[in-house]
Amino acid sequence: PVPVSAPLIINGDLTIKPTTVITANGAAQLNVSGCVNLQGGTVQLSLNGSSASQTITLVVSQSNCLTGTFSSISANGDQPCTKASTQPTYSSRSLAVIVNFEQTGCHEAGQNPLPSGGIGENNGEGAWGCEGLVLRNVFVPEARR
């Protein structure tokens, strides 16, 4: 993968091959003085600390000659119980990606979901929480007869 974590200025033309994988954060941008030829490739956006929808201008051609598309653009964040979706918008000048986050079900894979109003996802430390309620090492004695 080609990591991009800040704006990157490229003098001349840029061609992205089908096998290229770009990993980037929300501050990343490829600013190209010449033409951009996208022949496929994959972009993986990592938007840690964010759960708000946002638009990221990922590629800019200062010569107004961006052609082609990426094969895949995906995004993820680090907020619990959310899923990210992407919607790219291509023009002759730039590629902007709208990233939307949506709330998802909050239960551990393979487990039955809690009843409505339940508390969420097991964080691997014996604590359940998606709504801020955390129970740790709770002991419930057997009922007496």
Image (spheres, rainbow, N blue to C red):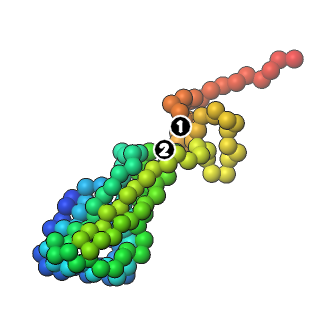
Q: Residue furthest left?
A: 11
Q: Quadrant of residue 94?
A: bottom left
Seen as rendered, the residue at the extreme right is 145
7 with respect to 129 (left or right) = left
Tell me if I can see residue 105 in this picture: yes
Q: Amino acid at mark 2?
A: Pro
Mark 1 is surrounded, within 10 Å at the Cα level, by few (under 14), some (14 to 19) or many (20 or more) other residues, namely some
Q: Can you say whether 141 is above or below 57 in the image?
A: above
Q: Position of residue 77 (x, y in %)?
A: 41, 51
Snapshot quadrant of residue 88: bottom left
Q: Which residue is mark 2?
A: 80
Kindly state the secondary structure of the residue where label 2 is placed. loop
Would you call the spot at circle 2 few (<14 residues within 10 Å), some (14-19), or many (20 or more)? some
Horizontal and vertical percent for residue 45?
36, 60
Q: Which residue is mark 1?
A: 130
Residue 20 percent coordinates (x, y): 34, 77
Q: Are marks 2 and 1 in contact (CB under 8 Å)?
A: yes
Residue found 70% across the figure and 24% down from its top: 140
- Name the image quarter holding the C terminus: top right
